[in-house]
Every structure is written in C-alpha cells, then in structure tokens.
Image (tube, rainbow, N blue to C red):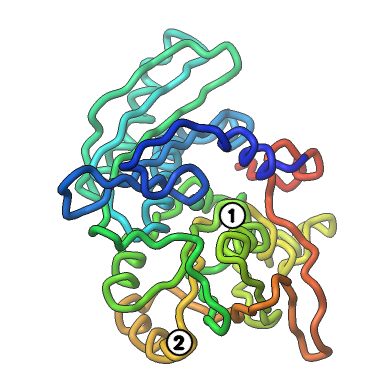
Amino acid sequence: MDEFTLIRQWTRDLPTRPEVLVPAGDDCAVLRVHGADHDWLFKTDAVVEGVHFTPEAAPERIGHKALARCLSDLAAMGGLPLAAVITIGLPQVDEAARVQKIYAGITELARRYQMAIVGGETTRSPGGLFLSVAVWGWVERGRAILRSGARPGDAIFVTGELGGSAAGKHLDFEPRIREARWLMQHFDIHAMIDLSDGLAGDLRHILQASNVGAELLKRAIPVSRAAKQAALRASSAKPPLVAALTDGEDFELLFTVSSRDAVTLLDAWKQAFPDVRLTCIGKILAEPVLTLRDRNGVEPLTLHGFQHFCPSNSSAFPQS
Ligand SMILES: [Mg+2]
C-alpha cells in the first residue's frame, strides 16, 4: 500500500469541528474562528536524521530546513506565517551547542518572515536527531488556495527548476512565500501545491483533488542544473528529465490558472521576480489521465514522485 493511501486511511475518522474548513489532506488545515476576517492555517512537519538530512549536515541548515518545509506549505495555501513551536529530539543529552546552532538556523529564517517562535520541547531520542515544527499562519477570509480548484483548460505553471535537490537545495531552499502572496494578490489562482514529493507525484494530488487530468509538455519541464550535473557525474543517476519529474524536495510552487491569464501572468512575473524562473508546463484536461507530450506524440506518464515507506526510493533520497 502506498504512503498516500495509508495517510488517507489514518486520517479518515479524525475528529472535527464546524470551524474546520479544510481538514487533513491539503497543504495546511484551514480553520475559521467565529467572527474573524481571516482564516487560520495550521501545519506540522518533521525532519529526521538519516531520512531528511545526514549526520554531517550543518545544524543551522537542519534548523532552516525544518521550518522552511512548513513555510513552503503555508505558501502553497497563499498564506503568511505568524508563529511556530519546535520539538527537538536529541541523541545525546550534552549536545547544547548543536541545539543552539539549530535554533540559529530557525530564527534566521523566522526573522525574515517576521514570525515568532513561541515555544518548544527538547527530548532524548535514542534513534538520532529529529525536529518537529508546528506552524500557525493566516490567509484572508475565504482566500486559501486549495488543491481542489483546477479546471479543464487551465494552464499549469511551476516556479524555479526541478530535480537534483539532494545536491544541496533541500537544505537551503527559500520557501516561496513572497511569490505565492504576489500570485494570489494579482491573479485568480485556481489550485496550488508545493513540490515536496516530485512533480509527477504532487501534480497527481492536484488532479485527484480537482477530479481532472493533465497533459505535460516534455520539453517545457524546467530541469535544474543539479539534475543535469548528477547525470553527467554518474551513469547510474537518473536521466535529468526523470529527476525533474520524480525527485523530492524541490519546494517550488505548482499551480493552475485560466489559460486566458497565462501570457499576462508570465509577463508580470518577469517584472516582479526577474531571478525566479516561471514555466508553463502543460494544461489541465477534463479526462482523469496524466500524459506527457513530445514531438512524436502523447504517452501516459507512468512515473511517480517520492513516497515514504517505499523501498524503491531508498537510492533516490536526499543525502547531503
Ligand atoms: Mg505541501
């Protein structure tokens, strides 16, 4: 059984309340408390030694990554962060210096987004270092961008470049909060997700939630330099396009807008974010299929993104 089927099973019967607008299953939960002119966003995420970083990774980068992953999910909803609480599990009790550096990475990022760190917990961990971060954020009332809003005919866009994040980006990436806020303020974004499990996997989450399909244009997929270099270095590495479709932890934004807005969006984006690539990579279809088009025609896209609990992923996992 795959990770996402398991998660659906585990979260099926969770208790809820009338204030819960979006329960487990999107990038963040959305709550509306009586009378508020904004909606609250909640998200928790964990990074674990040997899974999300190696023991050699600099503690500042580990702290940065732990918080940045949550901020990337807030960005995917169009939201802004307010505060976070941090739980750290330490393999040894006398690692005070390491914790201080982890917190330095966390606070450096938090300050840049004017968010508060309002509490935490430190515990012993017999199985290696881990960090669990819970973030509280907000979005204007009714404006949270969900995975479920994609419509047939929409253009599909992705920010940045994809694949090869394991070479270093997965520890240092900047969550796309500013870009997401700009997008929701200037355009009618139908659906959005942040890329944590790879384009092929995360696009499927939008398709499933929106009950639609998609066709991607093979030569439009923005392949990162890191993915190309990895392929040059080792013949055993994934071909760059496969890496761009399946590597986890790109933390870019994947979203859909009406195709009528596509040209205006690309033009305005270049003015607003000259250093961040934005690419139209395909379109949303009414039929629930996922296909890849190249100059020879159209083929079904059978590749999947990264999944935890899946042994075939083990060699593809971020290890730097
Ligand atoms: Mg996400």
User: Which callout, 1 or 2, points at the residue further toward the start of the chain?
Assistant: 1
> How far apart are labels 1 and 2 at the CA level?
27 Å
* Residue lying farthest to the top in this orientation: 93
Name the residue beneath numbered marker 1: 165
Q: Position of residue 25 (x, y in %)?
A: 52, 47
Q: Nearer the viewer, residue 154 or 195?
A: 154
Q: Amino acid at mark 1?
A: Ser
Q: Quadrant of the C terminus?
A: top right
Q: Position of residue 156 (x, y in %)?
A: 54, 76
Which structural element holds mark 2? helix
Which structural element holds mark 1? helix
Name the residue beneath numbered marker 2: 262
Q: Is residue 60 above or below residue 25?
A: above
Identify which residue is drawn at 63% across, 81% down.
Answer: 220
Q: Quadrant of the N terminus?
A: top right
Q: Nearer the viewer, residue 53 or 1?
A: 1
Query: Can you tell which quarter of the image residue 176 is in?
Result: bottom left
Identify which residue is drawn at 74% across, 75% down.
Answer: 291
